[in-house]
């Protein structure tokens, strides 16, 4: 089995490149509800009526996110570069995550005692079920 690793190649938030990205996390979820008939002791079915992805981008240089405002919305594109695996597996094509409608929900900055302060940007992309909130290519 080949094990490949990925490195962040580029991040674009609403058309602007974000440099010095240290980490990205993507958490996908769905709003679900269960259907249980009268007198039944078991769940008959589970439906998901909406989907969402929460994305956090951590940067080493807070200046990279200073001009992005809470509530700003648009396209978020993350490109991951496939690296050679520890087992010698060859690297392949880059992987691109595209969120067509990502809205900034939170922004934080931190100031170290010496040097440039870092920060993080949180975005949320949501839509009705069967809508591609996140598209990998």
Image (spheres, grey):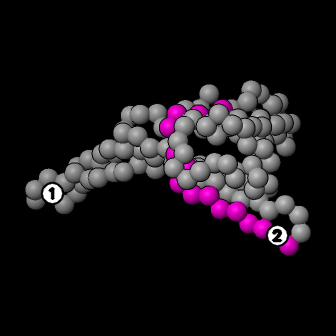
Q: Pick the residue in front: 71 or 137.
A: 71
Relative to residue 15, is residue 29 depicted above or below?
A: below
Query: Which residue occupies 14% across, 53% down?
Result: 37
Mark on residue 7? none
Number of marks in picture: 2
Q: Pick the residue in front: 110 or 55.
A: 110
The furthest residue to the left:
38
The main secondary structure of the magenta stretch is: strand
Query: Which residue occupies 36% across, 51% down?
Result: 31
The location of residue 83, given as percent across then percent down, is 81, 37
Q: Which residues are magenta?
A: 96-113
The location of residue 79, given as percent across then percent down, is 70, 35
Q: Is residue 24 left or right of residue 113?
A: left
- Does any portion of residue 82 appear in the rendered image? yes
Residue 109, quarter of picture = bottom right
Quadrant of the image for the N terminus? top right
Which of pointers 2 and 1 lies earlier in the amino acid sequence?
1
Quadrant of the image for the C terminus? top right
Q: Pick the residue in front: 135 or 119.
A: 119
Relative to residue 83, is residue 108 depicted above or below?
A: below
Residue under pointer 2: 112
Relative to residue 90, is residue 35 depicted above or below?
A: below
Residue 6, quarter of picture = top right
Q: Is residue 39 left or right of residue 28?
A: left
Looking at the rendered structure, the secondary structure element under dot 2 is loop
- Does any portion of residue 3 appear in the rendered image? no
Residue under pointer 1: 40
Q: Residues within 10 Å of mark 1 (few under 14, many from 20)?
A: few
The furthest residue to the bottom:
113
The location of residue 131, given as percent across then percent down, is 41, 34
Q: Is residue 107 left or right of residue 118?
A: left
């Amino acid at each position: 089995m080949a094990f490949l690793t990925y490195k962040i190649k580029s991040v674009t938030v609403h058309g602007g490149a974000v440099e010095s990205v240290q980490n990205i996390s993507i958490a996908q979820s769905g709003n679900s509800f269960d259907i249980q008939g009268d007198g039944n002791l078991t769940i008959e079915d589970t439906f998901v009526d909406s989907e969402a992805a929460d994305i956090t981008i951590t940067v080493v240089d807070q200046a990279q996110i200073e001009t992005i405002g809470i509530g700003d919305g648009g396209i978020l594109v993350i490109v991951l570069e496939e690296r050679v695996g520890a087992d010698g597996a060859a690297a392949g094509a880059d992987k691109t995550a595209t969120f067509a409608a990502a809205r900034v929900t939170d922004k934080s900055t931190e100031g170290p005692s010496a040097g440039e302060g870092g920060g993080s940007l949180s975005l949320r992309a949501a839509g009705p079920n069967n809508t591609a909130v996140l598209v990998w290519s």
